[in-house]
């Protein structure tokens, strides 16, 4: 049985190793995505804090400010109505207005490209704009490029599928690695399987590093594998979770008001959503793209696990401001609560700065395993090649 497991482990590592290295290294940077983006583009993403606020202080945007920002964009023919507004989280941050480009939508081999316009929340002045989703290594494009390499390999739905399959391969590598590591249940054998010594013998050191390192890294790799598959291919994961835990019904909300009802303003939608979660911070507002679609509003509750934008959602009828649906991760069904842990664990933010630091450092682990595994494979196959040449001679 072990030769079959070793074969699976070996070839899964050789075939998917390069992709896993790329995912690990890009993930190290993306653990600090916002901070690095601000560092690279301060003129675009940072402004003077509103009067009376210290830089970096937590900030809650008033509905009237959101309405004013939307109207400012509508009045300017260069911008118009955005598809989504992302709100500043801290004093000194900017509004980010998103615009879909109908000519640059996602396809089998292409990532959707959107336009981002940044506004100062105090003055409503435009600080600049950029595209998000293209490929490039300029300062405005760098974090977008790293994100889309990590999520899609910059190859649209095809790349997304490849990343999902790579996550399954990582799951196999982790499980088969533990089976291959498993020693005889004696104190000496267990100690040997967990020890890394150099002793002047590089091949032995390389093998011990791969073996012992795999044991300690396997739990984290399993979490990253499952969460990565879920993000890219949720249709593979949801049936498995639904078989053992309760999940809320899937599907998008739709307006229940009359089709000819006058549309409500963003301010009204935001007030209605905020009334459902008075203590939460509204983080983004998606405007209806078509008639019959509601406002979709994201919030973050004070004790919510997910940082940044949070995972609380409210759908507001665009005709009468009634609440169509709420998603509360703190009171969700067991299956939904399990899934809500995926992103915070994947990024490390579930454990704050320490967790993000750990994930950032852990990003080099796939490179270590790929190099040490390649050395082991070469060492194992070299004697066979020599024997084959000797027989041929």
Image: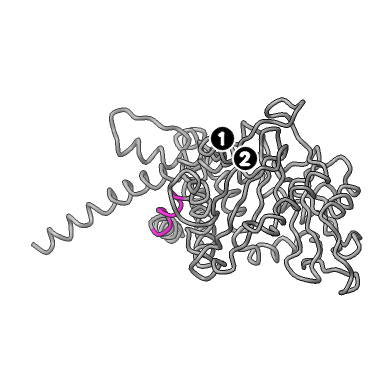
From the viewer's perspective, tell me whether residue 302 is left or right of residue 27: right
Query: What residue do we see at 88% from left, 67% from top?
Result: 262
In this rendering, is residue 151 above or below 207?
below
Instruction: Check disc 2 and report the residue beneath it.
Output: 348
Instruction: Check disc 1 and report the residue beneath it.
Output: 358
Query: What residue do we see at 54% from left, 59% from top?
Result: 168
Number of numbered labels in the structure image: 2
Q: Position of residue 115 (x, y in %)?
A: 58, 56
Query: What residue do we see at 28% from left, 29% from top?
Result: 200
Disc 2 is placed on an element classified as loop
Looking at the picture, tell me which residue is in the foreground, 170 or 96. 96
**Which residue extends farthest left?**
393
Give the class, few, some or many, for how many residues have Cα within 10 Å of label 2's Cα (few <14, many ≥20): some
Determine the main secondary structure of the stretch shown in magenta.
Answer: helix
Give the class, few, some or many, for how many residues have Cα within 10 Å of label 1's Cα (few <14, many ≥20): some
From the viewer's perspective, tell me whether residue 361 is left or right of residue 371: right
Q: Position of residue 32 (x, y in %)?
A: 56, 38
**Tag 2 or tag 1, which sits nearer the N-term?**
2
Judging from the image, the colouring scheme is one colour
Q: Which mark is residue 46?
A: none
**Highlighted magenta segment, given as a residue range:** 15-22
Asked whether 21 falls inside the magenta stretch, the response is: yes
Q: Is the residue under label 2 in contact with that under label 1 (CB below 8 Å)?
A: yes
Asked whether 319 falls inside the magenta stretch, the response is: no
- Measured Cα–Cα span from mark 1 to mark 2: 7 Å
In this rendering, is residue 130 above or below 57?
below
């Amino acid at each position: 049985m072990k030769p079959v497991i070793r074969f699976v482990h070996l070839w899964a590592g050789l075939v998917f190793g390069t992709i896993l290295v790329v995912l690990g290294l890009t993930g190290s940077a993306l653990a600090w995505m916002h901070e690095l983006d601000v560092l690279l583009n301060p003129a675009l993403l940072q402004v003077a804090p509103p009067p009376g606020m210290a830089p970096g202080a937590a900030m809650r945007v008033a509905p009237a400010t959101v309405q004013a920002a939307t109207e400012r964009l509508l009045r300017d023919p260069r911008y118009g109505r955005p598809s989504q507004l992302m709100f500043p989280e801290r004093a000194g941050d900017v509004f980010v207005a998103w615009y879909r480009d109908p000519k640059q939508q996602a396809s089998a081999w292409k990532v959707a490209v959107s336009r981002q316009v940044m506004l100062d929340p105090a003055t409503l002045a435009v600080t600049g704009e950029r595209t998000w989703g293209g490929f490039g290594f300029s300062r405005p494009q760098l974090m977008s490029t790293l994100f889309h390499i990590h999520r899609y390999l910059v190859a649209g739905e095809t790349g997304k599928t490849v990343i999902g399959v790579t996550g399954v391969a990582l799951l196999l590598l982790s499980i088969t690695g533990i089976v291959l590591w498993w020693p005889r249940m004696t104190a000496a054998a267990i100690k040997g399987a967990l020890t890394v010594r150099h002793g002047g013998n590089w091949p032995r050191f390389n093998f011990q590093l791969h073996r012992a390192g795999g044991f300690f890294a396997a739990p984290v790799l399993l979490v990253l594998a499952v969460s990565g598959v879920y993000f890219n291919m949720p249709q593979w994961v949801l049936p498995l979770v639904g078989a053992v835990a309760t999940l809320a019904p899937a599907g998008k909300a739709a307006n229940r008001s009359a089709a000819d009802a006058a549309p409500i303003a963003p301010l009204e939608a935001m007030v209605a959503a905020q009334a459902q979660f008075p203590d939460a911070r509204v983080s983004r507002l998606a405007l209806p793209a078509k008639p019959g679609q509601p406002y979709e509003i994201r919030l973050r509750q004070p004790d919510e696990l997910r940082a940044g934008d949070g995972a609380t959602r409210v759908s507001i009828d665009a005709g009468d401001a009634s609440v169509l649906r709420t998603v509360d991760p703190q009171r969700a069904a067991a299956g939904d609560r399990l899934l809500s842990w995926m992103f915070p664990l994947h990024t490390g933010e579930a454990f704050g700065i320490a967790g993000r630091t750990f994930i950032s450092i852990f990003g080099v682990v796939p490179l270590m395993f790929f190099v040490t595994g390649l050395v082991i494979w070469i060492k194992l196959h070299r004697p066979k090649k020599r024997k084959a040449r000797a027989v041929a001679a």
